[in-house]
Amino acid sequence: MSTSYRKRAIQAAREYANFKPIFLDTETTGLHNTAEIVEISVVDFDGSVLLDTLVKPVHSIPWEVIRVHGITDEMVVEAPSWSEVWPLVEKILTGRYIGIYNADFDIRMMKQSHDLSGLSWEISEFRYFCMMKLYAQYNGTGRWQKLEAAGRQCGLALPNTHRAKDDTLLVHAIFEHMVNAF
C-alpha cells in the first residue's frame, strides 16, 4: 500500500477527532453465536474512564476463554446483568462517535447480549468506526493487526491484558498516535 493510504487514514482519524469520539471494548464468553459480554469499558476522548464494569452473563464462562482474559464466573457472580448495564451504556453511547477495535465483533456481542437478556435491539444505528480497519490503512499493509501488535508498532507502552479497560485505553492511545502522526 502506498503512503497515500496512510495519509488518508491520518486525515480520517483527524476528522473523527473533531467529533471527540469515545472508545469502547468488551470481553466476552467466546467468539461463537451465543457468546455474551462479561466486561465492558468506555473511555472518553480525553482518556478518562466513563464506564468499566464486569457483567454477569446468562451462561457460564468457558475455561478456554478464562485463560485469555482471566475473568471467572466467581468474579461476575455479584456483577450487574447486561439488562442492568445496558441503560447506562446506551446513555453514554447515544449521540457520540465510537471508536472500536474490531467494531463488527463488539457490536455483534452487544446484540447477542441483548438477545440472551431478552432485550430488543432498538438502536437503528450507532455512529461508530472500526479502529482495526483504520489502523490497517494507517500501517500501510492493509492487513488487520492484533491490538497488541498495533500498540507495539506505534511504540506505545500501554499493556494489552485482554481486559476491557486496558484494551480501551490502548485503542485510545493508538488513535491519538494516528491523529498526531506526520
Image: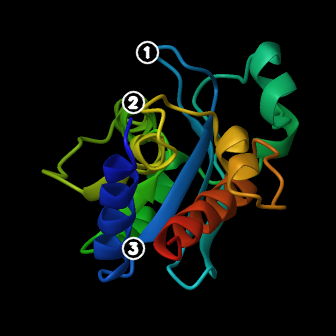
Label drawn at residue 128: none
Report the Cα–Cα distance between label 3 and label 1. Answer: 28 Å
> Could you say where residue 67 lies in the image, as x and y percent from the top left?
86, 24
Q: Residue furthest left?
A: 124
The local secondary structure at tag 1 comes to: loop
Towards the viewer: 68 or 8: 8
Front position among marks 2 and 3: 3
Residue under label 2: 112
| In the rendered image, the vertical position of residue 94 relative to residue 63, given as above or below | below
Question: In the rendered image, is residue 90 in sight?
Answer: no
- In the picture provided, is 103 more to the left or to the right than 72? left
The local secondary structure at tag 3 comes to: loop
Report the Cα–Cα distance between label 1 and label 2. Answer: 7 Å
Question: Mark 3 or 1 closer to N-term?
Answer: 3
Towards the viewer: 137 or 38: 137
The local secondary structure at tag 2 comes to: helix
Residue under label 1: 33
Report the Cα–Cα distance between label 2 and label 3. Answer: 24 Å
Amino acid residing under circle 3 = Pro
| In the rendered image, the vertical position of residue 121 relative to residue 57, given as above or below | below
Residue under label 3: 21
Question: Mark 2 or 3 closer to N-term?
Answer: 3
Residue at 70%, 48% (x, y): give it.
Answer: 153
Specify the quadrant of the image occupied by residue 161: top right
Specify the quadrant of the image occupied by residue 46: bottom right
Amino acid residing under circle 1 = Asn
Residue at 19%, 52% (x, y): give it.
Answer: 123
Looking at the image, do the residues carrying marks 3 and 1 touch, with CB atoms under 8 Å apart? no
Question: Mark 1 or 2 closer to N-term?
Answer: 1
